[in-house]
Image (cartoon, rainbow, N blue to C red):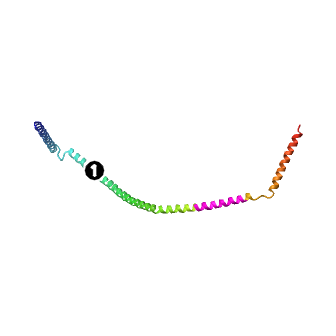
Amino acid sequence: MKDEIEALKTQKAEAERLAAEREEQGNNFQSRVCIFLNFRRNHLSDGSPKVRALEENLIKYKEQNTKNTEGFRKRLGAVNSEKSELSATISELKDEIKKLIAERDSSRAISAPDASQQLSAQLETLRQEKAALEQTLAREREERATIAQVPVEGSADQAALIVSFYCQTEFYHLSRSSRLP
């Protein structure tokens, strides 16, 4: 408990010290203002050349500041108008994007069944073409088989002729080899 009382007394003394410093600073500032005003009254009269030069500089400064401010306001106005135009354009484009997205989504919803129907139709067409090609292939095979089975006229004569020719050639070769020394 005694420690708390001591701590509170220390805090109170610190607060009083800070309050005194601030009061002194405030008085110091007020005294500076008073000194400046007295200096102005005593040393700078309205007719002195320093005052006139300062007033001319002040007038030039105010005019330049006014011109700069007007130029800034004009540029700021132009930028704000451009910003509002761009904002309007952005909002229009966002609306258009929303419309396009809705249109795309609706076309997707509609085209999904159409696409499956188209694919089914294509599949059926391909199946029909396959069946027709298989039938054509079967007919071609049958025609080739019947052509292969038909006996060729004179084929027996041709075979006999080939055999006799072969035999003659062999006989010729054999007779020649017997004549060789």
- Name which residue lies at 69% across and 60% down: 142
Can you give x and y, in whole percent of width and height, for residue 158 in the image? 81, 54
- Name which residue lies at 30% across and 51% down: 68
**170 or 88, which is in the foreground?**
170
Position of 177 with respect to 51 (left or right) is: right
The three-letter amino acid code for the residue at tag 1 is Asn
Can you give x and y, in whole percent of width and height, for residue 99 in the image? 41, 61
Q: Is residue 9 magenta?
A: no
Residue holding disc 1: 65
**18 or 176, which is in the foreground?**
176
Can you give x and y, in whole percent of width and height, for residue 116 in the image? 50, 61
- Name which residue lies at 70% across and 60% down: 143
Can you give x and y, in whole percent of width and height, for residue 71 in the image? 31, 53
**170 or 90, which is in the foreground?**
170
**94 or 7, which is in the foreground?**
7
In the rendered image, which quarter is residue 75 located in? bottom left
The stretch of residues the image draws in magenta is 127-146
